[in-house]
Each structure stands twice: as C-alpha cells, then as structure tokens.
Image: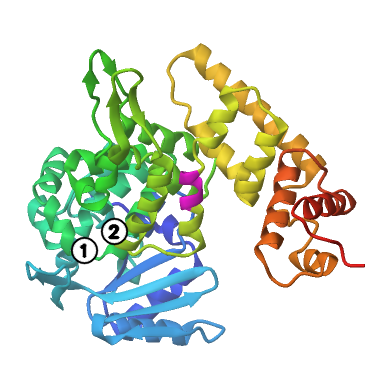
Amino acid sequence: MPQQNHKQALQNPIFNILSEAADELNVESYVIGGFVRDYLLKRGNPKDIDVVAVGSGIELAKKVAHKLSGNPKISVFKNFGTAMIKHGDLELEFVGARKESYDRNSRKPFVEDGTLQEDQERRDFTINALALSLNKSNFGELLDPFNGVIDLEDKIIRTPLEPGITYSDDPLRMMRAIRFATQLDFVIELKSLQAITENKERIQIVSKERIVDELNKILACPKPSIGLSLLHKTGLLDYILPELTALEGIEEIEGQRHKDNFWHTLEVVDNIAKTTENLWLRWAALLHDIGKAPTKKFHKKIGWTFHAHEFIGSKMVYKLFKRLRMPLNDKMKFVQKMVLMSSRPIVLAEEFVTDSAVRRLVFDAGDFVDDLMTLCEADITTKNPKKQKKYKNNFKMVRAKIIEVEERDHVRNFQPPISGEEIMNFFDLKPSKEIGIIKAAIKEAILEGEIPNEYEAAKEFMVQKGIKLGLTPKP
C-alpha cells in the first residue's frame, strides 16, 4: 500500500513548531494514536495530541515549550519518560519511542528505548498505531504498518500483534477494545473477541479505578448496550458487575414466567441514553433492578414477586460503589435514591393520581423528581404498541400533575412552616417527644392536603394538635 500524505491534518501552527523543534534536535518525531485516528474518522478536532520521538520525548517537550509563546508550563514525569504541555485548549503529551515486556502479575511494563515500529507494535489496536511524520523531510506522511486505515474503513477493532499476548500483557486493553467498539460502533475482530474471552480472569489485576473509567465511557455512549452486551458475552461482566449478570435468565414454574431482567436493564440504559447525558442517572438505570435477583420468589397464588427489590437494590448500590472504589458521596446517594424510588411513579401511573400521592412523591424525591420521572419513562420496554402508548400517556399525566401540585403547594424540599423552636415557645416546652409529634403531624397534614403549605394554617393546626396532646398554650 503506497504511503499517503496528510499535511492537511497538521494545519494547526503547533505542528510547525513541533517540526522545527524535532529537526533542530535531529530526532524523528511523529504524532500518533487518537489524534490521527479521529482525524481520519472526521471526528472533529481532537485536543489531545500524543507525540512520539525516536529519542528523548522529554528533551523534545522542553525544546517545544521554549519555542511556544506565553511560557507554557511543562510537566515532566521522569520515571515514565514522558512530558506534558498545556497550550491553549491543546494538551500535548511527549514520549520516547519504546518497546515493552511484561511480568504476568502486573500490567506495568518493563520499558526500553525502541524504534517507531516497536512503539507502534506495543499499541493496543491497529487504529491507534497510526502515525504522521512531523519532520520536514516527510511532513504529514502516514506510517501504517498494520493496515489500521483499512480497519478504520472496515470498522474493525484489531490488535497489531497476536491478540492473546496483547490482552494478557495489559488486560485493561480488553475493556478498551469494548469501549472503542461502543464509541465508534465498530466490530471486534473474532480472534480478538475469543482472546478477550480466554483472558477474562486477567481483568482482576487491573485497578478498579481504571475499570470504572472505561465503564463510565461505555455508559456515556449513545448506545451503551453494545459495550454491556460485549462485556457479558466475553465473561468480563461476571468479574466487574456480578450483580448485573445475576439478573439474566427466565424461570418458569407452573406455566408462569418472569421477564429476563438483565436484557431488560440493557434496554432501559439505551432508552435513558436517548434522553439524558447525566452519567449518574445512566448508572441508576443500569442498577435500578439489581435487587431483583436476591428478592425473587414464586408464590402459587400470585406468581413471581420481587418484594422490596428497590430497598434491597439501594443497599446493594453502596456495596457495589465501595467495591469498585467509586465515589461514596452525593453521586452515590443520588443513584441510591433513584434505585430506591424507581417504582414509585410507575405505581402512580397505573392508578388514579391523587394530589396527596404526587405531593409525597415530590417531597421524597426533592430536586430529583424530574430525573426520577426520566428513569421511569426509560423503564417502559414493552413491545406492545398499545401498552407503550398507554404507559407514556400515563407518565405525561403524572408529570403534568407534578407541575400543578408543585406550583400550588411548593412541597419540593419544603421545610414545615412551623419550626420546633416555635412549638417549644408557644407551649412553653423543653425538648420533648411532643415537639416531634406536632412537627410530623403538620408535615402529614400538608402532604395529605388537609391544610395548605402556609404559616397561618400550619399554626392553627399546631394549636389544635397541641391541645389534643394535652398541652396548654403559654399565657
């Protein structure tokens, strides 16, 4: 295949500076990896630029930094032989060409200086091994020893070397293969897919943080089910999210069956990906049914039940986040809340919607009531057009009712109009259980619609409730 020239990819003035610096140091240098791949795929203008030098990447970075205006900060990582420069909205990473060898118990390689070809061989996929020359003599020339351009055209994920070695050496590449297949809508070559399946247990030596980073990127894709089903097909999901694979399968007893909650979950995630880019809401969709595996029971009279699966599932979220070293902060609490409340709007949509039920939903969900409705709408996976239309219309009614009740009653994140301190002063009380009883009664009365969410009405209710409890107002 004749070598092609892609000078048009290197029109940004930064590449002329890189070229001058490389020639002054008399080192071969190339832009490699994602920048070249995304340019050839016409995926916008990549801001991350990886530069490989056949020599010292750090020295090249220093030379470039010296030539750039604005005195940009250069970060040097001597242990890794890399350097980084941030220049405007660009991030340039420099590394010396190298070859690698691996110890079986670690994905950290033993690194030696190498040629460009050896550096390209160590890359994860042929589509990421593409390089464009930055030297003046052949500026913009494409070096593609593994036919990565053909793989881009054929939409194939393939490794430069034998896939079994590539994935065993660095098992994170198995996750990356699946992530790229999901992001780009490519197919993983059959030999690669088999090698991932054969090496699946090697994922255990990869840090949880790296695994979650790839999972997040899969979940952020337009159709996350591509990656999730590949993780399942290769057996990786059993090691990463066994709570999900536990949902797979349909049982039948006495002619009664339940749906396959694993494949249903993947549909829900795809549905929610069409309506929101909120990563944590996508996580909530992924985990909304995990409580169904441990709560599944068959009863002769009523068939299959998953009693309290939302409550059990919300508890499982904490354990899952902790195991995967995910943030145990407000993000985790948000996912827990969504899982815990995931059936509430569904129940409302199936019945006549009362104001009090909507008030309680809005009060309990707070600022996340819209996210909760989005999750429940994504949960509609029936293939029956009539049922689908009915459920969607019901949810529209619930949404309209939420707006109506919220405008009138202001119960989202509401604080009762009467404080505990005011109750104590009015009845001349010290801290006691009666204060809690009155406060709870006021809240219930507002949520039930017995009194409006207003100060005067709440005060009058407080007086009556206090008298019923045998309290006497202070003179």
Can you give x and y, in whole percent of width and height, for residue 259 in the image? 32, 24
Q: Quadrant of residue 133?
A: bottom left
Indicate which disc, 1 or 2, sits on the residue closer to the N terminus. 1
Specify start and end residues of the magenta stretch as a single range: 335-340
Foreground: 56 or 417? 417
Q: Secondary structure at mark 1?
A: loop
Identify the main secondary structure in magenta: helix
Q: Secondary structure at mark 2?
A: helix
Residue sitting at x 87%, y 51%: 460
| Residue denoted by label 2 | 211
What is the spatial separation of the Cα atoms under label 1 and label 2, in whole angstroms? 7 Å
Can you give x and y, in whole percent of width and height, for residue 392 in the image? 58, 23
Residue sitting at x 48%, y 27%: 380
Amino acid type of the residue that numbered disc 2 sits on in the rendered structure: Ile
| Residue denoted by label 1 | 206
Residue sitting at x 28%, y 46%: 243
* Mark sitting on residue 72: none
Q: Is residue 454 left or right of residue 138?
A: right
Foreground: 276 or 190? 276
Tell whether position 81 is magenta: no
Vertical comparison of 21 with 432: above or below: below
Vertical comparison of 18 with 3: above or below: below
Can you give x and y, in whole percent of width and height, for residue 20 in the image? 40, 78
For the residues bearing labels 1 and 2, Cβ distance under 8 angstroms: yes
Amino acid type of the residue that numbered disc 1 sits on in the rendered structure: Val
